[in-house]
Amino acid sequence: MNLCWITLNVKNMEESLKFYSELLGIKVFNRFSPGPGVDIAMVGEKDKPKIELICSRNSNSEIEASGISIGFEVKSLDETMKYMKSKGIIIKRGPISPSPKVKFFFIEDPNGVEVQIVENR
């Protein structure tokens, strides 16, 4: 069994795509509207797990991001932190290094989803 995607409900599709696609550099794989008031975007690479972003303008329910965390691996944590700060992204926690082989920090996406940026050494 392989992971295909995770689904995140988002408040604003354009804001979320700017974060994941422009800021984090994850390509938009597919984007479509399955019905009135619903927009779906799949971000990620072909044949790899993706993030499915769903924006439903018909829903009055609150977006619940508590307890959700997504992790991305980078080559240089220090360079990525500098980049995030230059883009006005607030580092919520970190850097943290629980062992000599791993170091990470946390930011949040526009919907409050915790995003962990990790460097494996």
Image: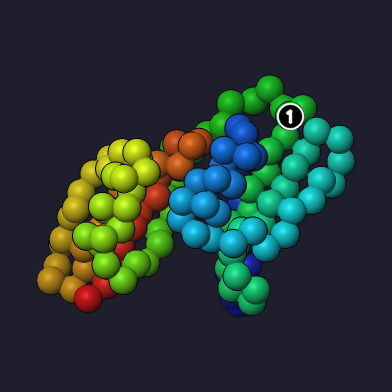
**Residue pictured at 52% horizontal, 52% vertical:** 22
Spot occupied by residue 19 in the image (x, y as percentages of width and height): 50, 46
**Residue pictured at 74% horizontal, 53% vertical:** 31
Query: In this view, which residue lies farthest toward the right?
Result: 35
Spot occupied by residue 96 in the image (x, y as percentages of width and height): 18, 55
Q: Which residue is mark 1?
A: 57
Horizontal side, residue 2 vs residue 116: left or right: right
Taking depth in this image into account, of 116 and 17 the one nearest to the observer is 17
Spot occupied by residue 1 in the image (x, y as percentages of width and height): 60, 77
**Residue pictured at 78% horizontal, 38% vertical:** 38
Note whether 76 is above or below 116 in the view shown. Answer: below
Horizontal side, residue 26 vs residue 47: left or right: left
Query: In this view, which residue lies farthest toward the left?
Result: 100
Give the residue type that dot 1 points to.
Arg
Secondary structure category for the residue under label 1 = loop
Taking depth in this image into account, of 68 and 78 the one nearest to the observer is 78
